[in-house]
Every structure is written in structure tokens, then in C-alpha cells.
Image (tube, rainbow, N blue to C red):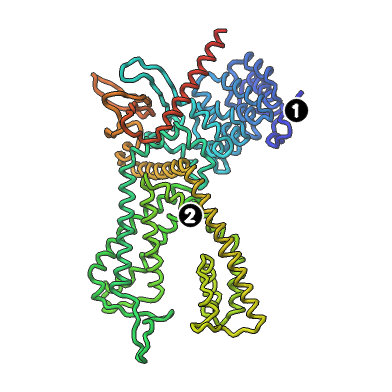
Amino acid sequence: MEPAGGNNPAYEKLPTMETSFATNEENMVIDTRKAFEHVRAGRIRHLSNVFANNPEIDLTVQDIINEKTLLHYAALYHSRKRALEMTELILNHAATETLKRKLVEIQDNKGETALHSAAKNGRARIVEILLPLRPDWTLRGKDNQTALDCVYKNVPEAVVTDCNACVGYSEDGTERCEELLTLNFKGLIRHPDEEPDVERLREVHMLGGLITDDAERFKQILEHPVVQVFLHLKYEKGYLVIVASIMVQIFWQLIYGYFLFHIYFEACPWRLIDDGSGNSVYNMTFEASIECDGKNLDFPGIYLAAIVWILAVIFLVKEIFEFCTVTALRYFGQLENIGQLFGIVSVIWTCWPIYERLSGVEKPIINSWQYNLAAASEFTVWALVLAQVCKLRPLRINIQIFAKVFKSFVLFICTFASLLFGFAAAFCIIMPEAKAFKSPWLAIPKVLVMMTGELNYDDVFHNDDGNSKLQYTTSQYYTTQILFSMFTILMSLILLNLLIGLAVSDTQTLRENCRTAELSSMLEEIYLLESFAARLYKAFGYKWLLERLSVTNKFSNPSWLQHSGETESKVEVESIKDMEGGKCVSEKISQKITLEFSRAFEYPFPRDVMIKLRELAEAKVKDEQEEESQSLV
């Protein structure tokens, strides 16, 4: 007899035949004990006999020690084939779909469901059986992972199989349409039946687990044609809202950028002054401060500061919401979010001259560090403008390329940082009289500039008359020349060209895989927007935005919908309405709409997606025909 559970540590503390169960019927207790023992031992025929002898056996019973059900143990069994057969046997014994769903949702002493167990143990076929039952995937184990998190992490291919089942195909005999492709998004929009309407309208909630920095991990899911159609339809519904959000953020960044430029350059610039000795010097040192004429700050500085503050508060609330919506690692892993926080916090200190002016100070004092902060903030806001512009649909891939190349550059510099520091320190030691190498803090930027090819050999070693500007012994002279030559070969020729080659390679690779990055970016934008709309509804009862984003509502007559003439294909996504006297009195939450796509216009998603949908649908029809013919035989 095969050992129960094999060497799987999950079976070390399994209860024995003496385990007590929470049931009062003695005959049921005996059969239930037998069922548990047969499942642990993998005895499929014996388990089938128990079910046949006692059809009323309670499948929801949990053992005392691990609080697992028969379905838990079936999913954990060490033999994949037997685990699958026992899972199918247990589910077939369940009388209704509701009971099957309830069975999958029962949690053990670790808070894990049978779907957790199957996904963590890599049982893709079992996951493929459990997912269509639409269990509550939001249940979390003690490790704070949902069942869907485990599926995405361990068996993403099971989701692909589930998406394949969402495609249907049939012939249509009408003159306008020769074929009918049916998409059922229920596989992507999974909500328990008891969920309130606001949660049902959060249609991308299930896909939120795909939002990570490494989009390539979920390439097979994101690039599935059903998922692509769904995301593009959702994006089409929210495109105007997304564009409006981008425009508002750009407006705030431009206003803040102009405010900084006006205050710290036009109204109170950092100028050269005469120190009385006939020499021009800076009007401040590191510790110094200057007095600014308050009249220069009155208009438009005060009004700009008021607008900047109002917008800063609004976007601070937006950033707090985004931080609460995604994981902390995901939030702080994006440079854009860090830049937004820096810009918002810097408003407090860069507006300080305005505070003093409003308090009645005739000549507000501005410290040197405020100029430094203003300069950093000015660069940050314009970088954020670039990030927002590149969120627009035609430009989205550009920011993905930039981010990828930037990460590669940072990793490259960190890898070879020791060489940079080594050359900088060596030049400081051997050439302390050179202006660029009087200090390590000056030497490092100089070495970075030299790395780009700006070596300036004569400027470092010779005066205008051609003589050496540095005092060397013969050995020092040759040491300096060797170090300079090594730097030219290693840093300027080899490493710089290697970095350029890596950047070009990353760019080409990213362009080839741009679809995944674009879809991941679309998903995150839709997810955040839909989450905001859901919280807006919960807080104020404002439901318009959430309904607008739902694919169940009609589209506002976009150009890609065909209304007359030749139709290439028709995609049907279920629509459920209650009719009374020929009028629509209510529309239930569902996942189907009906669209007709024209050859004359571009689709809201890549045209090759339609080809993949047809291939999936035709393959499904072919499989169904083969199964039907085999059943007849």
C-alpha cells in the first residue's frame, strides 16, 4: 500500500483513525473517518465506494488538528495524477455548484483554502478545475497571501487555460456578419455572489495581483487575447478620465515650476555683487543668506503660491490613496512616486519667502539651501512632466524604454564604482595641484565627465605655453601618464562602449516586448482609477465614475464600432437586462456587451488580437467536435 502523503512535510501531523469530528451521527463519523484515511493514502477506489455507500457524507467536515477538508488533502497528495482524480471525485460528489464553491472556500488552521494548497504545490490541473467555480479568492492565509496570489506566483498557466475557456465561436447566417466570436469575461471578473454592487463593479480587482515591477513574469497572462481585449475595452472607457488626470498633474507641475523660476530667478536671483575691493563675488557663502525685496514677491508670487498649495494638498491626498492601494514596495519602487512626494514636501520650504511676506516682513530672508532645494525641485517637476506626457497612449513605450535603460545604467555604475573611486583617489594623490583633483568631491564628477570622452589632456597637464603645469619627479610623471592611459582604455573606451551597447540592446529587447510593458502600465492605471472610483462611491455614494469604467455599460459611439456596411466580425460580451413593456427598467451587473468591428476603422486593441481570438475559438470548436465524435463512437 502506498504511504499516505509520502515524504511531504504537510503530512507529518495528520490525524489518525482516532481523530474526533464535529458531527453527532455515528454512522456518518465512521464513513467520514474512512474517507479521510482513503484520501491521505490515495486509495481512489475505496474513496469512491465510501461515497457510493453514503451519498449524504458531509464534505465540509474538517479534522481537528489541521482543520483541513477532504479537498485540502486531495490537493496536497504527493502523486499529481491521484491528486487530480481524487479532487474530481470529491467535487463530483458535491450536489450543487454552491456546495462546490463553499467547499473550495473552507480555510484550514493556516487560513488556506484548497485553492491555496493546490497553487502552492504547483497543481495546475487542479487549479484549472477550481478556478471556474468562482470561489472567493480574497480570502487570505496567515501569510497574508490570497489564493490568487499563489496562483499567479506558482501556476500562472492555469489562468491562461481559464482564459481560453472564455472564448466561444459560432457561425452566423446574417448578411452583415458571417461569424460570431463570444467573449465571457466572467473568468477575469470573479466576485462571490454575496459581494455588494460596488465590489462587483471593480472589474480589474482580480487582475491587481499582476501589478509588479517585473511584468515579464506574467507575460503569458497579460498577452492573452482575452485579457488584452478586456484591458483595452476598460482603458477605452476610462481614457478621457485618465487623460484629464494627466492634464491636471501636468498643470500643477508647470505652475509649481513657474513659481520656483519666478521666486528664485526673477524676483530674488542669486547674483554676483561687488565686495568693495573691485572684485565680483557671489552674494552668499554656504552659511550666508540674502534679503529679498518683498515687493518683488507680491505679484504674481503670492497668487502662484496659493495655487501651488491647493494643488499640493490635492495631490498629497492622491499619493496617500495610491500608497494605500498598492504595496509599499511597489509604491516606493517607482521613481515617479518618489518624485511626486519630493515635489509636494519641497513646497513647504520653497514657499517660505511668501510666508514671511504675508506676515508683514519687508525683506524676507532666503537661505542658500533654499536655492539648492528650488533648483532640485525645478528639475524634478519638469522630469515629472515628462513622465506624465509619456503616459499618453502613443508615447507610453518611450518612458518604459527610458526606465529600463536608466536601471541598466545604475546597475552598471554600481558594479564598476570601485574603478571610478580608485581612479579618482589615485588622481588626487598624484596630481593634488590640479584644480579638478584638489578634493575627492571634485575628483569624482571630473572622472565621470572624463569617462564620456572629455579627457582634456592638455588642460590637465600643460599650460598655454606648452610647459607642464604640475611639478613632477620623473617617476611621478610616468606614473601619471600610465594612470591616465589606463583610464582612457578601461573607462572611456571599453566600459563606456559596453554601457552604450547594453543600452541599445535593452532598447531593442524592450521594443520587441513592448506589448507586455504597455499592458502592465494600462492595468495599473485602470486599477488605481477604479479603486479611486470605488472609494468615492463608498464615501459619498457617487457611483457615476465607477459605472462609466464598467464594460457592462454602452460605449459612447466610438469610431471603431461599425453601425452600417460590411462587418468583419462580431464580439459578443454578455448583456443582461430586465425588460418590462418593451423598455429596459434595470440592468444587472454582468460581464457581456455586444460589439461589431469594422474593417474601415482601427480597433481599440491591436488587430492581431482578433486573429488570436479566432484561432482560440476555432481550436475550441475543433476540440468540442472531436469530443462529440468520440462520445458517439
Q: Picture coordinates of residue 491 (x, y %)?
A: 58, 64
Residue 81 is drawn in which quadrant? Answer: top right
Q: Residue furthest right?
A: 1
Above or below, comparing residue 325 to residue 110 in the picture: below
- Residue 52 appearing in the image: yes
**480, 101: nearer the viewer:** 480
| Label 2 crowd bin: few (<14), some (14–19), many (20+), radius 10 Å | few
Instruction: Report, in whole angstroms, how far the alpha carbon at label 1 lies from the one at label 2.
Output: 48 Å
Q: Amino acid at mark 2?
A: Phe
> Does dot 2 land on a helix, a strand or a loop?
helix
Residue drawn at 41 percent across, 73 percent down: 369
Q: Picture coordinates of residue 535 (x, y %)?
A: 37, 44
Residue drawn at 32 percent across, 28 percent down: 598
Above or below, comparing residue 502 to residue 617 in the picture: below
Q: Is residue 295 left or right of residue 74?
A: left
| Label 1 crowd bin: few (<14), some (14–19), many (20+), radius 10 Å | few
**485, 141: nearer the viewer:** 485
Q: Quadrant of the N terminus?
A: top right
Number of numbered discs overlaid on the protein picture: 2
The numbered dot on residue 332 is 2
**312, 171: nearer the viewer:** 171
Q: Picture coordinates of residue 248 (x, y %)?
A: 31, 52
Which residue has dot 1 on it? 3
Chain-order first, disc 1 or disc 2:
1
Above or below, comparing residue 319 to residue 9 in the picture: below
Residue 252 is drawn in which quadrant? Answer: bottom left
Q: Is residue 397 left or right of residue 119?
A: left
Q: Amino acid at mark 1?
A: Pro
Q: Quadrant of the C terminus?
A: top right
Above or below, comparing residue 538 to residue 557 in the picture: below
